[in-house]
Amino acid sequence: MTVYWVVWDAAAHWVVDRLEREGALPAVTRMRARGTFAAARPARPNCQTPPSLATLFTGAWPGEHGVTGFTVPGAGDGLVSHVSGFAPRFPAVPPVWESASEHDRSSAFVHAPWVFRETGGTGHYVDAAVEAYSRRLTRHAVCPVVPGAGTQTWDLGPFRAEVEAAPQDGRVRVRTARTDLRLDVGGDWQPLLLDDAGHGTWVCCVRTPQGLLLVHTGVWDVRTAGRNAPLVHALAAGPPFAGEGVGPLYRAGVFGPRLAEGGDGSAEEVFLSSVRCVSRSFGAAADQVLRAHDADLVVVYLPMTDDVGHELLGWCDEKSAAHRPDIADQVWSCLRRCYQDADAVLGRVLDRAEDDDTVVLGADHGMVGSTHLVHVNDHLVRAGLTATDADGALDTHRSSVLYHPANNGSLWATDQADPVRAGSAVARAVATLRTLTDPDTGQPVLSAVLDDRGNVLPEGAAFPPVVFLALADDYQPSSVLLGEGPAVRRTPKTGAHVVYTGDGRLHAVHAAVGPGIPAGGQPDVPDVIDNTAPARLVLRQLGVAPPWAE
């Protein structure tokens, strides 16, 4: 008996539901027909990826597991310190696999967080694990190519490649100490090995309005471990790791104008093809684990749906001001292609599962359309509540309150030791933030103030030293200090998820099939659950926990 837990990052229930009803996700359809299908409320008050994954994997809320943002405020030295929510010190509550190990259940992992320890090893219960996100060596980048200009040197972080465009055949040659590639302009991405230690990236050559560009997806240091030596070796020998597509380059117009800016779709094709490298990388690792694992619990994490959602989803979100009816169908087809890659991996998991196995599909959170960033500290500086030093950085000694640079939605009084004084400072900040409006529409951008458990604090209530800001639809907080210009500005990133506002678009997808799991449509099967529930379900199916209840 095995429990397979497949996690699609940022797979919003509303997106999966719509795609499945269109017939685009056959694996999800198989699960929906045989088991449960529901929406899941994410972590609160913050629903960025680390706290949301921690809630999903532990069955606890952030107040218990301690992961309160992409970076966690107050986890280092000083008021404005913050450390990664994926640091080995987190989460404070054991993930499901650690609880299961106490009952002699083993696990296998495809790029799940909090598996490798600070020393680099894994628990005795790990059959096999692969992980690379925590050790990125360099981000994606481009290299302009001039045909006939001879050999160029391309810096890829700590690595080097020689590049030469051959005018006679229109191809580009890329050489490293390990690989000699010849790339067609506009052709598919190719794996580029960089050394004998297994480092690599994916590269392609694209024609842009500025000329020919070589593009790579970034370089990570992949680590593997576990007691199943052949499987660990197979994971280490896989294709280069690609942890994300080249979304920031696409957003910056490197590949030409986006559809929303009058483009013809060619920029989206470059971006989507880079996300396909992520699908190939993660899919290869998942296939190795499915083929050869001995584990009771198999966790497969897939990031592609988050990647494409941030770049494209807002234009398809009819509830968002980012919605673009003129291009929505074309953009939706782009989203569909990415979700279909994730669905194909899920289909292979379902094919591998036997009758007494369980398959759970989940997500950490959903996503909403976004149009503006709100630079909170800029407004507080102008209100005289926050100060900056000579270099333009936050000056905690001269500030009474600040929006935390962790950018997890939290507003902090600088005097945490005196609750009354701190609450008064927060109250003044909230009062001035309620006056902050969009300069184009006049709409207020602050909709509610939340406590550290995500509960709305009513007007007139005494504020604690730390509160969370729930902004109006389409507005997301930013900790970046601009210094000049409006505090509310348009953003090219169309999809977001920071503070959980209660909006159903931020609900994650949840589906499950297996022994004892009722089919959907029955009166006792809820349509909406808390995202703490899947962890209890997984433990129950492993035979190490009491029956799951909403």
Image (spheres, rainbow, N blue to C red):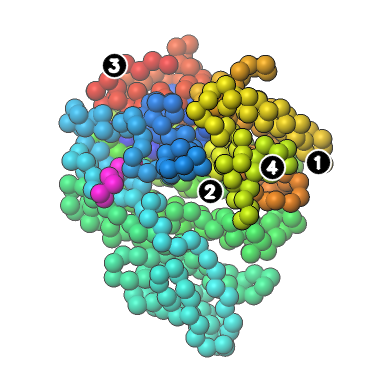
**Residue 527 image point, x, y percent:** 51, 20
Foreground disc of the pair 2, 1 = 1
Q: Which residue is mark 2?
A: 307
Question: Looking at the picture, does residue 61 appear above or below residue 251?
Answer: above
Residue 44 in magenta stretch:
no
The tag earlier along the polypeptide, 2 or 4, is 2
| Label 3 Cα neighbours within 10 Å, binned few <14 / some 14-19 / many ≥20 | few
At horizontal 35% and vertical 18% (from top left) the residue drawn is 548
* Front-lying residue, 264 or 155: 155
Sooner in the amino-acid sequence: mark 3 or mark 4: 4
Query: In screen coordinates, is 229 left or right of 546?
Result: left
Q: Is residue 319 visible?
A: no
**Residue occupying image coordinates x 58% and y 69%:** 206
Quadrant hosting residue 488: top right
**Disc 3 and disc 1 in contact, CB within 8 angstroms:** no
Magenta range is 114-120
Q: Is residue 439 left or right of residue 355?
A: right
The x, y position of residue 39, in whole percent, is: 51, 26
Give coordinates of residue 216: x percent, y percent.
49, 66
Mark 2: which secondary structure? Answer: helix
Whether the residues at callouts 4 and 1 have beta carbons within 8 Å, the answer is: no
- Mark carried by residue 355: none
Secondary structure mostly taken by the magenta-highlighted segment of the chain: loop
Q: Which residue is mark 1?
A: 439
Q: Are marks 3 and 2 in contact (CB under 8 Å)?
A: no
Quadrant of res 174: bottom left
- Which residue is under mark 3? 546
Of the numbered discs 4 and 1, the one sitting upstream in the chain is 4
Where is the N terminus found, in terms of image quarters? Answer: top left
Q: CA distance from mark 2 to mark 1?
A: 30 Å
Name which residue type carries label 4: Val
Q: Assess whether mark 4 and mark 2 are in contact (beta carbons under 8 angstroms).
A: no
